[in-house]
Image (tube, rainbow, N blue to C red):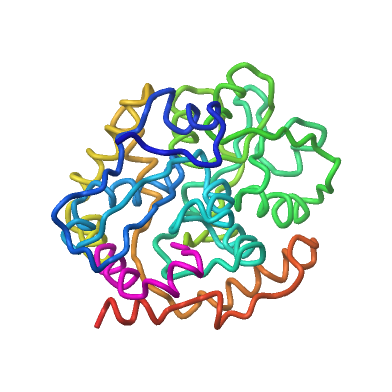
């Protein structure tokens, strides 16, 4: 069975897969029929790679869960698929999750990782830009709707004295930005790994700011409300599989790196293992529900409300569901 790509154009799918078809998350035979199969969404930038490894780790099979995977360039596209009920689970950062909850009642079942170190604002090397304020009047590549885009537009740019209109926002997918920088069709980009490491290694761009200094960027595993209501036992088994995979990230990092590195090289990306290692190093995988999640999400929601991107602050008792992780750890 080949991977399905519901809700995606052919161009989007080819971009997500590096002009090739990703290996399918096939329906595995001989597993317990009592747990619901999962339609798993993830992005093909570094934020989605823990999920990519998760699907290939064998842990879902060990916990009796069948799956099908849906790969897209960034998490905001996964969120849109979930709102349309084309996907059951998906990862993305806080602002995108809040938008998904507002539009489709999506719920967070765990914080999977922190990825602030993987996000940078970079400018073409020859421009010699070192401050965000210097982006005034320039063309900035930004994936509109993505969490990193919202943080740039709503927080980082205003803090540097840049209003909307002070720079030209060029909308494009994150995996197209390095080529645009090399072609000099844009001057700067708001991007994520491994594309930042590639741009740096190829002497195309230099770092302007690292998001870790502004936002640790927790990434959540979200689920549709339909799925958690109908299949709570499947959610718990799914999270048990994540806890097992987290041990690989802590204790067997080389194995994890080989699997993820092979994904990018198979799609035609040319980067050394050293460059890749730097890109992966910014991903901190630790599934759970830290105590600071709710204050962080409240802050992000207030920003989105002020910008009129959501109609109201979410009811966190409905939006955040730590009870599933508590059962998985029991």
Q: Residue at x 34, y 65 (%)?
A: 286
Nearest the viewer among 240 and 200 is 240
Provide the residue span drawn in magenta: 221-242
- Apparent side of residue 253 relative to residue 213 in the rendered image (left or right): left
- Apparent side of residue 98 relative to residue 133 in the rendered image (left or right): left
**Quarter of the image that includes the C terminus:** bottom left
Task: Give the answer, above or below, for where 3 lies relative to 61.
Answer: above
Check residue 233 for magenta coloring: yes
Marks counted in the figure total 0
- Apparent side of residue 153 relative to residue 44 in the rendered image (left or right): right
Task: Give the answer, above or below, for where 40 lies relative to 287.
Answer: above
Check residue 185 for magenta coloring: no
Task: Give the answer, above or below, for where 123 lies relative to 289.
Answer: above
Residue furthest left as drawn: 30
**Quarter of the image that includes the N terminus:** top left
Q: Residue at x 32, y 39 (%)?
A: 277
Q: Position of residue 111 (x, y in %)?
A: 43, 67
Q: Position of residue 182 (x, y in %)?
A: 58, 19
């Amino acid at each position: 069975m080949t991977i399905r790509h519901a809700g995606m154009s052919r161009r989007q799918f080819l971009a997500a897969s590096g002009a090739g078809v990703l290996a399918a998350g096939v329906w595995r035979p001989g597993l317990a029929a009592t747990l619901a199969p999962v339609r798993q969404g993830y992005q093909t930038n570094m934020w989605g790679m823990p999920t990519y490894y998760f699907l290939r780790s064998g842990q879902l099979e060990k916990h009796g869960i069948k799956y099908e995977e849906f790969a897209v360039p960034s998490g905001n596209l996964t969120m849109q698929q979930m709102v349309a009920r084309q996907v059951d689970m998906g990862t993305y950062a806080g602002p995108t999750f809040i938008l998904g909850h507002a539009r489709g009642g999506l719920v967070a079942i765990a914080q999977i990782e922190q990825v602030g170190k993987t996000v940078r604002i970079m400018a073409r090397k020859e421009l010699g830009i070192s401050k965000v304020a210097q982006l005034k009047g320039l063309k900035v590549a930004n994936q509109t709707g993505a969490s990193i885009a919202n943080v740039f537009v709503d927080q980082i740019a205003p803090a540097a004295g840049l209003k909307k209109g002070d720079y030209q926002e060029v909308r494009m997918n994150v995996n197209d930005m390095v080529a645009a920088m090399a072609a000099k069709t844009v001057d700067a980009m708001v991007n994520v790994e491994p594309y930042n490491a590639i741009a740096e290694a190829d002497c195309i761009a230099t770092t302007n700011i690292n998001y870790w200094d502004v936002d640790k960027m927790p990434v959540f595993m979200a689920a549709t409300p339909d799925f958690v209501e109908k299949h709570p036992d499947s959610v718990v088994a799914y999270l048990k599989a994540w806890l097992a995979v987290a041990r690989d990230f802590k204790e067997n990092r080389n194995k994890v790196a080989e699997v993820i590195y092979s994904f990018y090289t198979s799609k035609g990306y040319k980067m050394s293992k050293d460059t890749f290692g730097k890109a992966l190093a910014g991903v901190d995988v630790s599934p759970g529900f830290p105590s600071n999640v709710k204050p962080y999400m409240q802050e992000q929601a207030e920003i989105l409300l002020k910008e009129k991107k959501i109609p109201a602050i979410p009811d966190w008792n409905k939006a955040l569901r730590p009870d599933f992780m508590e059962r998985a750890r029991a």
